[in-house]
Image (spheres, rainbow, N blue to C red):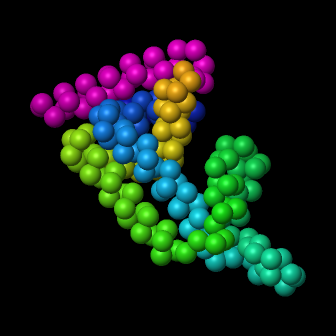
Amino acid sequence: MGTTGLFDLEGHFAFYGAYHSNPVNILIHTFFVWPLFFTAAVLFHFTPSLYNFSSGFNNHGFKLNLGFVLTFMSNWTRKLGPWQLCYVFSAGLEPVFLLLDRVFCWGGQFIGHGIFEKRAPALGDNFAQALLMGPYFVLLELLQSAFGYEPYPGFHKSVKAKIEANIKEWKDLLDT
């Protein structure tokens, strides 16, 4: 299982897709990735301020913390758009609820891999890529299934071929 270049979208999607080929596991991930994404963004809201303002900004809920930094980056780069929505809703939520949600959703995904996929999650092979690619993979799969959307013509077909090759390579390694 070779390395993937930073901008190799097909390679990243094929890597993640090879760990999610069972329909039940895919369904579990479709529902559990988003709460995990949301709670991660909200938990960043509760991080300490990176700078203490002596002005009235903090009195109005403004904190220069990791949540704000991610929100700013998403607005600036247009790459992390969902962070903006999560940051807006984060003020009224309790961290305990968010932590319980994370335990439930992570547990569901590990069950999906252990029982249905019969393959360890992608976290073991590439932790950062698995965490960052999950929400985007699920979103693109939903858009493709519902509307036939592809970032460019032939993307879905090429990714599916790479997923099949990756799964074959993994199964061949198991047989040796």
Q: Residue furthest left?
A: 176
> From the viewer's perspective, is 72 left or right of 6?
right
Residue 4 lies, with reference to residue 160, above or below; the image says below
Q: Residue at x 64, y 49 (%)?
A: 82
Q: Position of residue 77 (x, y in %)?
A: 73, 45
- Give the main secondary structure, helix, strand or loop, of the magenta stretch: helix
Q: Residue at x 80, y 77 (%)?
A: 60
Q: Position of residue 167 (x, y in %)?
A: 28, 28
> From the viewer's perspective, is 80 left or right of 52?
left
Q: Residue at x 86, y 81 (%)?
A: 56
Residue 122 lies, with reference to residue 61, above or below; the image says above
Q: Position of residue 32 (x, y in %)?
A: 42, 51
> From the viewer's perspective, is 164 left or right of 33?
left
Residue 10 lies, with reference to residue 61, above or below; the image says above
Looking at the picture, tell me which residue is in the foreground, 45 or 170. 45
Q: Over which residues does the magenta segment extend?
A: 149-176
